[in-house]
Image: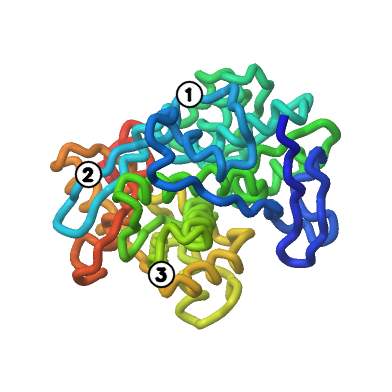
Amino acid sequence: MTPLPDRFCPTDGTRVPAASLAWCCPACRGPLDLDFAPTPASLKSLSGRVNSLWRYAECLPLASPTVSLGEGRTPLVELREGIQAKLDFLMPTLSFKDRGAVLLAELALRLGPRQVIADSSGNAGTAVAAYCARAALPCTVYVPAGTSDKKLEQIGAHGAQLHLVDGDREATARVARAAADEDGVFYASHVYNPYFLHGTKTYVHELWEDLGGRLPEVIVVPVGNGTLLLGAALAVAELHAAGLIDRRPALYAVQSAAVAPLAHAWAEGADDLVGTTPTAPTFAEGIAIPRPPRARQILRAVRDSGGAFLTVTEDQIRHAQRDLASRGLYVESTGVACWAAVREGALGSRTAVVPLCGAGVKTGLAGA
């Protein structure tokens, strides 16, 4: 079996052994990154490989998967000239979070904890619950008490224990992190565990393959904790370093105007979060994160790419969801945020891809 790479803290350089169950930097309690710099395979060599994200084996920190559900390889469809949508709501658990969750479950299998825990506003918890079920790993998922009933039902159906927390997404994370410090616990955090980012990066590897070895001028992603954006940045860097693309796309990050700490920091020209973020209820519950732990990395990734931040109102979300439904695409309210941001021409004539990250059956129609 291939040795696991070590983890390290991007803030202070503290290293964490590969086999440790430590979920954060022991010095600053920040998120960890992976000491892993792969070289992607050429486009030609991908022919005939398994039709899942595991076809990009050279770029993944784990090999020989045992809990795969066939995740990845979601289709691209045109929304209008120059803008395509990647249908990541067609994943096994109906959201893009499967890309990272399968790697977390594979890692947990190798480390052998007594318990796996996760915290989530719904989709990440569902994905972790499903892949833990596949791996026969005991799992507890912490969620805000106001999480959509359908998401709670889906998590429970996979056999995970549900722990409802009074308060918002941030309060839920605090409770889960306290539990994660107990002995023998694997914290399947889509925020703190870098394996998750190395799963989400396959989104861009697929774009590159499906577009014949190129990427669009702009990659638009919704950002709460930033796991898809940071995964996209990893993939772009890998492809560019290998000489497989000669131009890096701009990364455009979309937040709900109701909870937009990163967009606010961006507008202030800051390298990190600024002050206390005002919050309001939003249909985009999946990206309503007041204090994302990887804020500095997210802001830097957008800046380095030549991208920007966009925000969307509740009316824009509602209209975009109905617009997509009228085109045959029933997407959850968080998952339509990117289309809401660009459908009226915010990107000009540049080519772009937006992700449709979760299925509409998870939340129903916004405001209905």
Q: Check disc 2: other Cα within 10 Å, few if <14, some if 14-19, many if 20+.
A: few
Tell me what residue is drawn at x 63 percent, y 30 percent: 105
Label 3 or label 1, whichever comes before in sequence order? 1
Q: CA distance from mark 2 to mark 1?
A: 23 Å
Residue underneath mark 3: 309
Tell me what residue is drawn at x 28 percent, y 45 percent: 367
Q: Which mark is residue 69?
A: 1
Q: Is residue 135 left or right of residue 56?
A: right
Image height check: is 268 above or below 67?
below
State the image quarter where residue 185 is shown: top right
Q: Is residue 10 left or right of residue 346?
A: right
Is mark 2 in CB contact (under 8 Å) with mark 1?
no
State the image quarter where residue 358 is shown: top left
Q: Amino acid at mark 2?
A: Val
Residue underneath mark 2: 77
Residue 150 visible, this angle = no
Residue 212 versus residue 97: which sits nearer the camera? 212
Label 2 or label 1, whichever comes before in sequence order? 1
Please name which of the two marks, 3 or 1, marks the residue nearer to the observer: 1
Q: Position of residue 311 (x, y in %)?
A: 36, 66
Q: Is residue 247 left or right of residue 293?
A: left
Please name which of the two marks, 2 or 3, marks the residue nearer to the observer: 2
Element at badge 1? loop
Residue 254 versus residue 364: which sits nearer the camera? 254
Element at badge 3? strand
